[in-house]
């Protein structure tokens, strides 16, 4: 399997969720091809990077396939990947309308894991996000999600509404939690099972 992990706004491959998932794969599924790129601030450049990176990845069902995990803004991008490729997709508190929400972040920003690094989120990036926004998802059975009602940044009702139609077994709705999903390790078996990396979910 080929597995793509897409991090959130101001985040990086140093995300603790990405690191914990990669550590599990290294220990239990070293056969999985893992790619967690540093995403550029520009959505257009991000999409070009993703398209180039997965161009030769297998799209067939079964073990020799691809899947994507996306957190926050990465969940928005992961949805676009799912609709473009038909792959299995796990969303972690996914951003639903980043073109709206990130308007207030236009200007200079700091990288979350390396605050000494700065970048500019430019006004034209909002239009680039709009260009990637899909009217609705298709085939909700290929999506899974972990959504926290306690998310302090995104509205869980909007998230569940955007991904309405997911089979109940594919959705883990946390009664509390936070945007970072700080108890990520508790949900790792659910995520791995959905991605067909575990034979069963305890």
Image: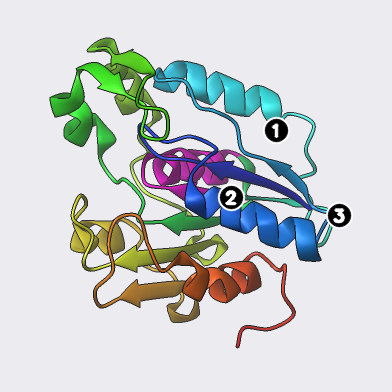
Task: Report whether residue 126 is seen.
Answer: no
Precedes in sequence: disc 1 or disc 3: 3
**Residue under label 1:** 54
Query: What label sits on residue 38 in the rendered view?
Result: none
164 lies above or below 200: above
Question: Do the numbered discs 1 and 3 sit on residues whose CB atoms are within 8 Å?
Answer: no
Queried whether the magenta region covers residue 83, the answer comes back as yes
Tell us which disc is closer to us: 3 or 2: 2
How much space separates mark 1 and mark 3, taking CA atoms? 17 Å
Residue behind mark 3: 31
Name the N-terminal-most of marks 2 and 1.
2
Q: Residues within 10 Å of mark 2 (few under 14, many from 20)?
A: few
Identify the residue at horizontal 13%, vertical 27% (top origin).
Answer: 104
Q: Most extreme residue toward the front, as rendered?
A: 116
The type of colouring in the image is rainbow
Circles 3, 2 touching at the beta carbon (< 8 Å): no
Secondary structure of residue under mark 3 = loop
> Of tags 2 and 1, which is closer to the observer?
2
Q: Which residue is mark 2?
A: 19
x 22%, y 12%: residue: 123
């Amino acid at each position: 399997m080929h597995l793509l992990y897409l991090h959130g706004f101001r985040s990086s491959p140093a995300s603790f969720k990405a690191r914990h998932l990669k550590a599990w794969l290294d220990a239990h599924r070293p056969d999985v091809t893992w790619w967690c790129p540093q995403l550029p601030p520009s959505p257009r450049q991000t999409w070009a990077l993703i398209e180039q990176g997965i161009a030769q990845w297998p799209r067939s069902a079964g073990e020799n396939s691809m899947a994507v995990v996306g957190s926050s803004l990465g969940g928005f991008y992961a949805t676009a990947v799912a609709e473009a490729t038909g792959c299995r997709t796990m969303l972690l508190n996914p951003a639903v309308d980043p073109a709206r929400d990130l308007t207030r972040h236009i200007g200079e920003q700091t990288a979350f894991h390396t605050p000494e690094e700065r970048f500019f989120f430019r006004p034209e990036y909002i239009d680039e996000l709009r260009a990637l926004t899909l009217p609705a998802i298709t085939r909700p059975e290929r999506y899974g999600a972990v959504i926290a009602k306690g998310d302090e940044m995104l509205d869980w009702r909007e998230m569940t509404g955007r991904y309405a139609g997911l089979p109940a077994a594919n959705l883990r709705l946390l009664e509390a939690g936070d945007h970072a999903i700080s108890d990520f390790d508790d949900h790792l078996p659910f995520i791995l099972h959905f991605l067909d990396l575990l034979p069963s979910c305890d």
